[in-house]
Amino acid sequence: VVIGGGLAGVTAALELADAGLRVTLLEGRPRLGGLAFSFKRGDLTVDNGQHVYLRCCTAYRWFLDRVDGAALAPLQDRLDVPVLDVAHPAGPRLGRLRRSALPVPLHLAASLATYPHLSLAERASLGRAALALRRLDPADPALDGLDFATWLARYGQSPRTVEALWDLVGIATLNATAQHSSLGLAAMVFKTGLLSENGAADIGWARVPLGELHDTLARKALDSAGVRTELRTRVTAVTRTGDGNWRVDTDGDSLDAGTVVLAVPQREAHGLLPPGALADPDKLLDIGTAPILNVHVVYDRKVLRQPFFAALGTPVQWVFDRTDSSGLTDGGQYLALSQSVAQDDIDEPVSVLRAKYLPELERLLPAARGAKVRDFFVTRERTATFAPSPGVGRLRPPGVGRLRPGPRTDTPGLYLAGAWTATGWPATMESAVRSGLGAAHAALAALGRPREHPLQEAV
């Protein structure tokens, strides 16, 4: 039995079923997809939030292939990110972060050398930090005890450099500023995404609603694999039986299982863990969370020509054109603003957010100044990710176990999955899929049914 129908749970269920096990997947909501889903708003199909992945996200790319959805979420041919600064004294400036065909680290050299949002001295300092970053081992526990901002300052990165480059990327991938990010997780993101392979940071995103990938196609793949999927089924208890197996109780039934994968958020997992499953289960409650706010604006005309851009000098962070994927066909344009590190805005009324963000969009997009706003709404994920704070991956206290546990528990036959578990990645779709694969392969190994891991780098 796999409990939880997000990316982690769907991945675990598919991998276990592909190995020949009989699998039941239980999900309390009426859909699959976890925190990456879609819903209807009138004639529009709306994603709850903008999600992207990178070419280096090999697990999520495997997932897309496994559900036959890769063509619906293509990657850029080459990394190209427009960055618009509207606070420059001389007026708005547009720069681009893009790569060439040169080998790492020269692939970004030309773009950074002409990046208009940094001074010549600040651009020159980037090389020093990049070379130092390449020497770091993200798996080194010592890195987790330091914040990324302190490390960047040691290597001559000015506050402006942090704002215009390191946080521009880090806020979107870590859901935290450098000051509040573990150096270990930040090093993992930047080293893997920017300094591992030439095309590692090329960006991909769904050209269809996320629900088509993570619900419709995922359900089709589960059905084809023989997985029994039960939606609207809330699990109330997981209990070890006298014969060493498991009983999973739901609102209206109970199931017997030899193996259980808990693929739910950390607080929900804490509530379901049976006694003795972890040495210190309360550590799960010490894993903090961080919110993401998404602002949705529908204009009566086209106001943005790019598929997306990032912004500086404004509260707006990243803006995506979701017109085609939403089904809007009447000549208007639908923009989605993805606002990470949204602690200050997450509980603000829609009227306050409208008054804040519409003028900012007009600053960024001159064409929006004369456009009519047909619709304005927000989606809020108050616990969108775990907080990547310094210490989240450390042994605490020494020798007892990490805040982020691995897939194995102390009770045979019970496994954990979720982006919050110890995948080495921040809370991304990539981390969720990796956790599902990790839980499935730990279970298969214990059952004496080892299976080749689908990720090439896996051992």
Image (spheres, grey):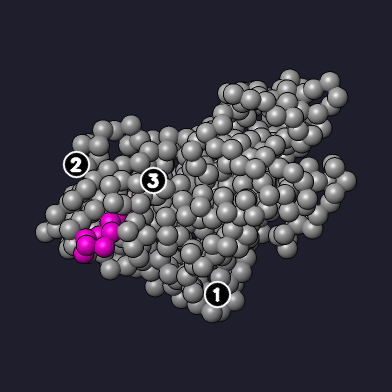
Please name which of the two marks, 2 or 3, marks the residue nearer to the observer: 3
Helix, strand or loop for disc 2: helix
Mark 3 is on which residue type? Phe
Going from N to C along the chain, the mark reached first, 2 or 3, is 3
Above/below status of 231 relative to 361: above
Circle on res. 39: 3
Give how far across and how far down residue 73 sits, in percent: 49, 63
Please name which of the two marks, 2 or 1, marks the residue nearer to the observer: 2
Label 3 neighbour load within 10 Å: few <14, some 14-19, many 20+:
some
Q: Which residue is mark 1?
A: 106
Mark 1 is on which residue type? Leu
Left or right of 206? Residue 318 is: left
Residue found 55% across the figure and 37% down from its top: 231
Quadrant in which the C terminus is drawn: bottom right
Going from N to C along the chain, the mark reached first, 3 or 1, is 3
Label 2 neighbour load within 10 Å: few <14, some 14-19, many 20+:
few
Magenta part of the chain: 328-336
